[in-house]
Image: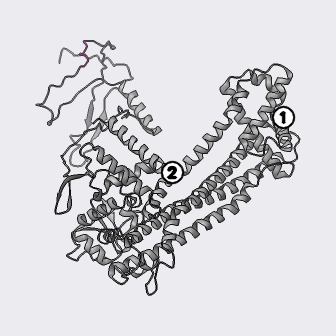
Amino acid sequence: MSRAQAESVIKNIIREIAQECASKGQAVSETLVAFMVKAVVLDPANEFNVDRTLTKDDVQKLIRLCVDRLMDSRSPALDTVKMQVYFDMNYTTRADFLDEHRRVLESRLLPVIREITDSRARTREELESLYRKIVSAVLLRSGLGSPTDIAVVREATAALQSVFPQTELGTFMTLTKREKERQLTELTMIVTGIRLFNKECGKGGEGIDDLPAILNEAVPATTQSVDGEIQSTLRSAYKYTAIVEAMQKGQAKEGPSIQLLKEALINTRQHETFLRIILNDVISCAHQVEVLENQLATRMEQLQATVQSKTAVPTAQVYPQFIHLAQLWSSFQDEMVLLSVLSNILASLEPFTRGHKELFSDDVLNIEGLTVKTDEERIQETADQRVNTKDYQVEKKDWLFADTTKNFSKLHLQYRGYCAYTLGKHDRLLVPANPDIGVMRYREHYYAFSSKEAAYEFAQNPQEIITLVAEGAKRSPELIQLLELHTQFSTITPYSQSREAGKMIEKPVTKCDSASQTDTHILESNIVKTYAWNEWELRRKAIKLANLRNKVTHAMQTNGSNMRRDNETQVYLPKEQTTQTKMDNYSNVSKPQVFLEGMRGGGMSVPTVMNKVDLTVDVSEPPIVRQFYVSAED
């Protein structure tokens, strides 16, 4: 059977189940029916085999079992499933709530906006009608008063005329449709800001509710209501837990069915989970209102300082402030819508808890002699317990503790923080865990326990306990969402036909090693290695480039690179050239001449006196020509 054929068969089964329930006076949604079909097929007690095509008898059996479950008015498990389906269909995030609200508002305004943008008014009466439509659109979009209230319309018209006189309609008609829509939005915000400022000054504000005051009353009241529901739900959960524990220990032999009690306990815990989600949103709403009130007061003071008693104020100064004031007021309106939606969800969840309250009234539940413990008391009892990692029973496991693990409080605990051992060994019994005992990390999941003994028992064979929890979730499909087991059940293989000794045998899962390779960098790298952010680095590079212009290309060879490759350099060849200088010349210097006188002495009686006479001719003097005369006698 192809996938399309299988989907068609499932849709027909769901449609037939819904029709049969409707014929019996019980209207059910297709989403609820689809969930119930999966739950019935998943339950091993029903012995469905989805490995082959369902026969006609299988389909009839499936329809009958689903109708029986859906028509059971005294089933806490069915109430829990209905609660989960309702919450999934109606609750979403804060941003999605507000986006949906704005989308619905715009869809309602669309016909009015289209009449304005598509108008081809020419006559005076048509232009006046168009202007009235613009006033109505401004009022409807701002949400400040009813367009049918004459006082509100007059005030809005006066504010609009101060910004957009009727004489400007001619220019407005020449704009494109997109520009008209943009201008209408801007006009709405400016007019809204003007009316809010007039209300603050006591000069207007017809039909404008005091949203900050309303929210200051509604938020605490909603918080108190949610907190009261949580406390009432917890009291029921504490009683159910105490009775189930007593019945499992054999202390209470008579009383209601333990199976129904566990289903009622699951219902209360699921209700508590949804209530805490709503409470967190209400608290976020309270914080947002506080921030908006401070911003509103600041903006009003700035407007007062800008306007004061001036007769004329530049539009460039005051219009942006009016627009911001309108945006703040729109945020107040969003908080009102969000608070209203949360209150409706809170009221709609209550009917899904009436079943177990009527089934297990105080007269039916006999808790005399039983110790009913709160979650805080259970945690307080185990406050001094801690897993000893040196114990041989747990030494090979990976344990995390608050004093040795960073962000310990933010660990995503498996089974939404309930004791893993109690869930498996005591068949779907929900008992809150105490993470301070020690959190065990097993296959990238974190498990917490309600006692030190439970932690030791779980550490002996974790996979066995995990399998027991999965088996319990198959019998109570509402646990899949409560314990966040969607990932685990997405790979569960359906039961096969073969049975041994009354046990269902799971089809083995075929596994193989596989790998995939992806590009490390999908986009082309655009890293500029020469980039420098430092101005002085750029200057150094500029100086180097300037110096290179005066250099000749050269190369060098070192001991490490000589035998590797040939290095070549290109140089300018030496040029043969001469230089012309002055002629060689010389100078003739006089030769030094010295005469020594009196070296022979004057005898024994006369002392020898030597005189040194310098006969060197000075250069500056002209040369002396000496003539020597030699006689014939010589």
- Residue at image mark 2: 27
Q: Quadrant of the N terminus?
A: top left
Answer left or right for 446 relative to 516: right
Q: Which residues are magenta?
A: 570-576
Q: Nearer the viewer, residue 410 or 311?
A: 410
SS at badge 1: helix
Q: Amino acid at mark 1?
A: Gln
Foreground mark, 2 or 1, reads 2
Q: Amino acid at mark 2?
A: Ala
Residue 78 in which image quadrant:
bottom left
Above or below for 410 versus 341: below
Percent coordinates x, y for residue 374 in the rendering: 46, 77
First-in-chain label (2 vs 1): 2
Q: Which mark is residue 521?
A: none
* Residue 52 left/right relative to 152: left
Query: What residue would you read off at disc 1?
Result: 161
How many marks the image carries: the answer is: 2
Of residue 445 and residue 421, the one placed in the foreground of this image is: 421
- Residue 387, horizontal then vertical, whole percent: 30, 76
Mark 2–mark 1 contact, CB under 8 Å?
Answer: no
Residue 525 magenta = no
Foreground residue among 434 and 363: 363
Examine the rendering and report whether any part of residue 375 can be seen.
no
Q: Tell me residue 8's x, y (percent).
A: 37, 37
